[in-house]
Image (cartoon, grey):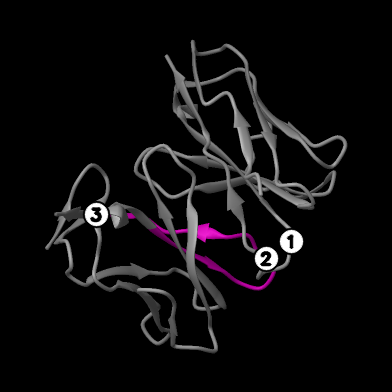
Amino acid sequence: GESVGLHLPTLSVQEGDNSIINCAYSNSASDYFIWYKQESGKGPQFIIDIRSNMDKRQGQRVTVLLNKTVKHLSLQIAATQPGDSAVYFCAERWGYSTLTFGKGTMLLVSP
Amino acid sequence: EAGVAQSPRYKIIEKRQSVAFWCNPISGHATLYWYQQILGQGPKLLIQFQNNGVVDDSQLPKDRFSAERLKGVDSTLKIQPAKLEDSAVYLCASSLGGSTYNEQFFGPGTRLTVL
């Protein structure tokens, strides 16, 4: 389940489970969204993106869902692995503006 | 392909001292970004360069922060004088261009501690 950890909500799952990380974005005019994964001591790494004219996009083991009505974005990770343990950030952009990152969620995967 | 390089990786200074960070973007990337990431938060953009020109520095505290990218490649970010609240990880990122859909590649960051 989810809990509030050190400034970050935390999702703890077992290896092999599916994980769902949620994000509420701020600007209804945002037209491009990205999910990033950040491991300890590293910079954010691109996972998957989605444009506002889509409501779902799939990658390898990951799916992003976009609900513009309620300004909600989710990242689904199938068959979660210990290597997926990291902090996940959603980011939004509108027009030619710069990326705005949301608050992160820490994913902890136990073997 | 080499990634974005940053140095130093860690820096500890006293408040009111000065500090500088260096970034070498991915070869051929015209756009360079500096972000500040405070513990427990997402990165916040400080400044964006397109080649050697500034595109966006609206969130850069210009009374103490400065950045340059003189030859359109490497960049330095300076803080003078540092305050306690500047303790954070400073991330550099680069992308091929400034277009909305150009992926940004991040370096490992410099962790700054101000005592």
- Please report the bounds of the magenta region as a residue range: A89-107
**Separation (CA) of disc 3 from disc 2:** 29 Å
Q: CA distance from mark 1 to mark 2?
A: 7 Å
| Residue at left offset 31%, top offset 57% | A84
Same chain, marks 1 and 2? yes
Q: Is residue A30 above or below residue B43?
A: below
Secondary-structure class at tag 1: loop
Is residue A47 rendered to the left or right of residue B72? left
Nearest the eye: A45 or B45: A45
Mark 2 chain: B
Where residue B3 appears, as percent x and y from the top left, is 62, 45
Where B60 falls versus A71 (above or below)? Answer: above
Task: Give the label on residue B102, or none.
Answer: 2
Find residue A7 and report its horizontal and vertical position in percent: 27, 45
Tell me, for residue B98, which label it has, or none. Answer: 1
Q: CA distance from mark 1 to mark 3?
A: 34 Å
Say what amino acid the circle numbered 1 marks. Gly
Query: Label 3's element?
Result: helix
Note whether residue B24 is visible: yes
Classify 10 Å Cα crowding around label 3: few (below 14), some (14-19), many (20 and above).
Answer: some
- Residue B69 in which image quadrant: top right
Q: Are marks 1 and 2 in contact (CB under 8 Å)?
A: yes
Visible in this render: residue A30? no
Do marks 3 and 2 share a subunit? no
Residue A99 within the segment the image draws in magenta: yes
